[in-house]
Image (tube, coloured by chain):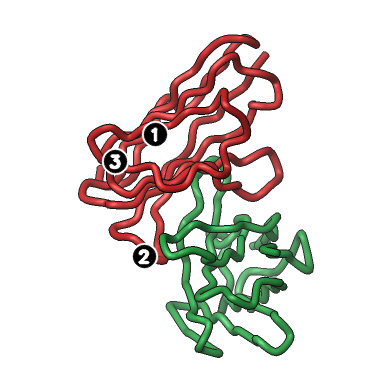
Amino acid sequence: GAGVSQSPRYKVAKRGQDVALRCDPISGHVSLFWYQQALGQGPEFLTYFQNEAQLDKSGLPSDRFFAERPEGSVSTLKIQRTQQEDSAVYLCASSIYRANTEAFFGQGTRLTVV
Amino acid sequence: GESVGLHLPTLSVQEGDNSIINCAYSNSASDYFIWYKQESGKGPQFIIDIRSNMDKRQGQRVTVLLNKTVKHLSLQIAATQPGDSAVYFCTHGGTSYGKLTFGQGTILTVHP
């Protein structure tokens, strides 16, 4: 399809385990965002990429969270030593160019840490 | 500071009625405001945006009104349908690259 694709859709991790969440943005989209959405809350910004450059990582909650987009397309959000408070839906969004108001979101990855 | 809040967390309407979802904001420097719709199990979906120099913008069955004097934003949905049932978020763009700040959201339930 032509939309933003995220995998896996669901991930159960044991506390202390490392996880990697993948985002395939719409082809040609310059901007890529990661958001974290806790149950019953609105999404909260984590980090932003313009092509391969990570220009804003102010929303990453701790140094256990790391994101990359090495070739300016696919992005991976990695969480090390997962904790229960990391349980949330992780959303990826892309937009065609910087400052575009319309961002396209993927379905998200629901992470449950047990 | 940057914050976006909503007056009502839930709204129930009958199919065919018009719906109005309200939102208050505090950041006067925002260049634009955007409404997103999120259905259960899906990511947010763009509905409509409005620039800060506009008062009103219309789309297909939706109208967004911006009152900068009282820092209030509303989304009007005409002839609401069951498929409109979702959580609605107002957001604002506060950076040059499209970073969004979401509020808690309003749950819209449309009864057939």
Q: Which residue is at 55% across, 47% downward?
A: A45
Give residue B47's mark. Answer: none
Which numbered disc, 2 or 1, marks the residue that appears first in the sequence?
1
Q: Residues within 10 Å of mark 1 (few under 14, many from 20)?
A: many
Chain letter for the residue marked with disc 2 in the picture: A
Letter of the chain shown green in the rendering: B
Residue A12, position in %: x, y?
A: 57, 16
Residue A24, position in %: x, y?
A: 31, 37
User: B73 or A48, which lies in front?
Assistant: A48
Chain A: give its colour.
Answer: red
Residue at numbered disc 1: A6
Tell me which corner region of the image, top left, top right, bottom left or bottom right, holds residue A25: top left
Q: Residues within 10 Å of mark 2 (few under 14, many from 20)?
A: some
Which numbered disc, 3 or 2, marks the residue that appears first in the sequence?
3
Residue at numbered disc 2: A100
Quadrant location of the C terminus of chain A in the rendered image: top right
Quadrant location of the N terminus of chain A in the rendered image: top left
Tell me which corner region of the image, top left, top right, bottom left or bottom right, holds residue B108: bottom right
Which numbered disc, 3 or 1, marks the residue that appears first in the sequence?
1
Residue A4, position in %: x, y?
A: 34, 43
Residue at numbered disc 3: A52
Q: Secondary structure at mark 3?
A: loop
